[in-house]
Amino acid sequence: MDQQTSPPSGIYPTPQDQVPGQPPVQNQIVSPNQTPAQSGQSNPTPHKDNTLKIVLIVLGACLVLTVIIVLIVFLMIHAGLKGAQSNANDAKIKSSLSSLQAGTAVYYDEHQSYKGFTLDDYTNQQVQSAGSKITVQGLSDKTYVIYAQLPSSKKFWCIDSQNFAGEVSGIQSSAASCQ
């Protein structure tokens, strides 16, 4: 009963495992629960390095996309606010000229003429702060024309002695009325 039992295959190196010019393969048994690093063998796991690279690339891409989305939203809000600001400036000009129209009526009642009417500093400053300037023309006993350019449309808001107040596309320099 001299039977020799051979070791299970795959545990011990065989002569076929030998590489010419290399040291012989050491006999080492690795438990199924051991990793090569625990058994003393060096067998790096390149898939862990690749996984880390992939995760970093995905996180970087997400960060770039987030920045792009925030930038787009910011630009949309900024454009909307710029339009709202332009509309607010138009409203300020219209309101200032409407007050001025009431002031010209009071002046006419007191002097029976529009000659000598001057703009008050407050109204002038309001219109200038809105990005425009007031132009007065045709002051006479019975007529006047006052207008300012609207920043949003490049048209003019015009008031005159005929009680007109409205938007016009242009005004002739010799005009005695807005229309």
Image (tube, helix red, strand yellow):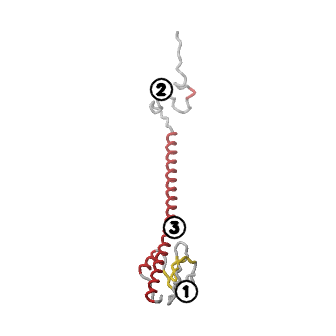
- Residue 100 on image: x %, y %: 46, 80
- The answer to whether residue 28 is visible is no
Q: How far apart are the two marked residues, 3 and 1, measured between alpha carbons?
A: 33 Å
Does label 3 or label 1 sit earlier along the sequence? 3
- Residue 93 on image: x %, y %: 48, 75
On screen, residue 83 above or below 178: above
What secondary structure is marked by label 2?
A: loop
Does label 3 or label 2 sit earlier along the sequence? 2
Kindly identify which residue carries mark 3.
83
Between marks 3 and 2 in the image, the one whose residue lies nearer the viewer = 3
Does label 1 or label 2 sit earlier along the sequence? 2
Estimate how packed mark 1 is, as few (under 14), some (14 to 19) or many (20 or more) residues with alpha carbons within 10 Å: many
Kindly identify which residue carries mark 2.
31
Q: Residue furthest front?
A: 109
On screen, residue 38 above or below 66: above
Kindly identify which residue carries mark 1.
176
What secondary structure is marked by label 1?
A: loop
